[in-house]
Amino acid sequence: MSKTRKTRIFGITLAQFLILGCLALAAIGTIFGGFILISSSTTSGGLSLLPTTSLQPTTPPELANGSGVFITPTLPLGDDQIPSDWKQYNATTIELWVPPQFESVNVGLERQERIDFYRGQGLEFLAARLENDSFDYRFWFNFPQPETITYGTHMIVKADVLPTLTLDEYIDEAYGAGLQGFQVVDRQEFVIENLQARRILLEANLNDLPISVAEYVITDEVNLWIISSGSNREEFGTWLPVFDRVAHSFRLLY
């Protein structure tokens, strides 16, 4: 029986040659397509321009300056946090932190000068308030202002023994109907670690000068401390957060 002779190219049959040709064309197409993709996604230096946002946090454009450094917004301090430039003051068993702009003055001298000044201005209720006060004055801080200012921005810390069974009882008596020259406009609880405290806001009028005072009344159920902070009423809203933070810094050293 005769056999049909198959045509061979390079030692393989025509069918095998055609299959290899198709595979070669497919491989060339794949390589060429990959080259186009890589070329379109790189710079001349070869750095990839493919998206990387999934690997990096998105920062709003308004937070970036021209140098490419991102600006971190300053977070406000909590009420119990002390600014780094504040000064620490100790008096026997208590600690307080105060802004550096306030000057610590001689308590005895300042108290007597204030009594004389208020009396000379006809402000007898203020002079009597200082003169008849039985508290032990521990600190007196003044914000620098001309001596001619009738009522300068200040903070005073004074101490005594709690004369009543409860703090609210004391406040009822001390800030009640017999409080001469001042009017209570607000009374609320105030948080100072491990102590009972209240903040009393007061207003008065000094020869047509409206003033405001924040008094922080604090007790450990035996001792009593008052931080009295005041300014003219026009500036009081600005000062009150500062007064609050000073009061929040109050600590016992025992």
Image (cartoon, rainbow, N blue to C red):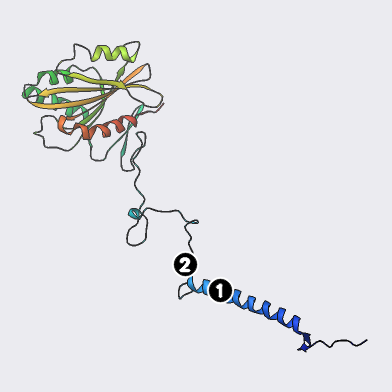
Q: Front-most of 133 and 125? A: 125
Residue 115 position in % (x across, y down): 13, 23
Quadrant in the picture for residue 130: top left
* Place of residue 82 in the rendered image (x, y in percent of width and height, measured from the top left): 35, 38
Residue, x 60% and y 74% (percent of image)? 30
Return the residue nearer the eye: 111 or 73.
Answer: 73
Task: Say which element carries label 2.
Answer: loop
Q: Quadrant of residue 193?
A: top left
> Can you see residue 105?
no
Residue 140, disc: none
Q: Is residue 41 left or right of residue 203?
A: right
Q: Is residue 26 above or below residue 210?
A: below
Q: Amino acid at mark 2?
A: Leu
Quadrant occupied by the C terminus: top left
Q: Residue furthest right?
A: 1
Query: Tag 1's secondary structure?
Result: helix
Residue 164 occupies which quadrant of the picture? top left
Is residue 150 shown to the viewer in this render? Answer: yes
- Amino acid type at image mark 1: Gly
Decide which of tag 2 and tag 1 comes sooner along the chain: 1
- Crowd class of label 2 (few under 14; some 14 to 19; many from 20; radius 10 Å): few
Establish if 226 lies above or below 19.
above
Screen quadrant of the N terminus: bottom right
Quickly name the residue at label 2.
49
**Place of residue 174 in the rendered image (x, y in percent of width and height, measured from the top left):** 24, 14
Counting every numbered tag in the picture gives 2
In the rendered view, would you say 223 is above or below 139?
Answer: above
Residue in the foreground of this view, choosing between 112 and 204: 204
**Residue 191 x %, y %:** 36, 26
Q: Residue at x 18, y 26 (%)?
A: 212
User: Which labelled disc corresponds to residue 33?
Assistant: 1
The reply, left or right, for residue 57 in relation to residue 210 is right
